[in-house]
Amino acid sequence: MDDIALAFTGHERVEIARSDLDALYARVEQAEALAANNYRSGRDWRTLAQNLERDVATLKSRLRDMDSVTRERDALLKFLDIAGHLLHTHSAGKADRPEFLELRDFALDIAYKHIKGDFFEGLGNQPEKLAWFKKLWNALR
């Protein structure tokens, strides 16, 4: 009767040796252990990735701060270069020249800019003003 019921449902009777069944159970246990290990490993990698993302955010913030400091330092060095040139020109007795007054006013504008918290980035993107500046600079050599 059981064989007839199996025939109607499309199933058939199969015999499995105990050793084969034990081997299948062992493989299931190995697969479960491997899955648990993979889960732990994935969790550890995810934690590491999150820590690295936090580190990257911190470093980007520090880099922005350093960039701001670098920009400010570069702007101050440009100002000091102009101020030094003015002092040298003054000590050379050229302070009464109109170029000196123009360059001095330009340096004072830069100083006021710094006081307001802005940076003097140079004149590289202003060719006419750069040419004017070079003319003043060279006239006072």
Image (cartoon, rainbow, N blue to C red):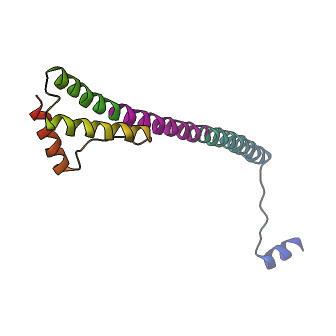
The residue sitting at 76% across, 75% down in the picture is 10
Q: As drawn, is 51 to the left or to the right of 72?
A: right
Location of the C terminus (image quadrant): top left
Residue 124's spot in the image, x, y percent? 22, 45
The residue sitting at 65% across, 38% down in the picture is 44
Image mark count: 0
Q: Is residue 18 above or below residue 94?
A: below
Q: As drawn, is 117 to the left or to the right of 101?
A: right
| Residue extending farthest front | 96
Most common SS among magenta residues = helix
Location of the N terminus (image quadrant): bottom right
Q: Is residue 61 magenta?
A: yes
| Residue extending farthest top | 91
* Res 15 quadrant in image: bottom right
* Res 55 quadrant in image: top right
The residue sitting at 35% across, 36% down in the picture is 111
Q: As drawn, is 52 to the left or to the right of 9?
A: left
Q: Is residue 127 above or below residue 81?
A: below
The residue sitting at 77% across, 61% down in the picture is 14
Q: Is residue 34 magenta?
A: no
Which stretch appears magenta? Answer: 51-74
| Residue extending farthest bottom | 8
Residue 123's spot in the image, x, y percent? 24, 44
Q: As drawn, is 137 to the left or to the right of 113?
A: left
Residue 74's spot in the image, x, y percent? 33, 33
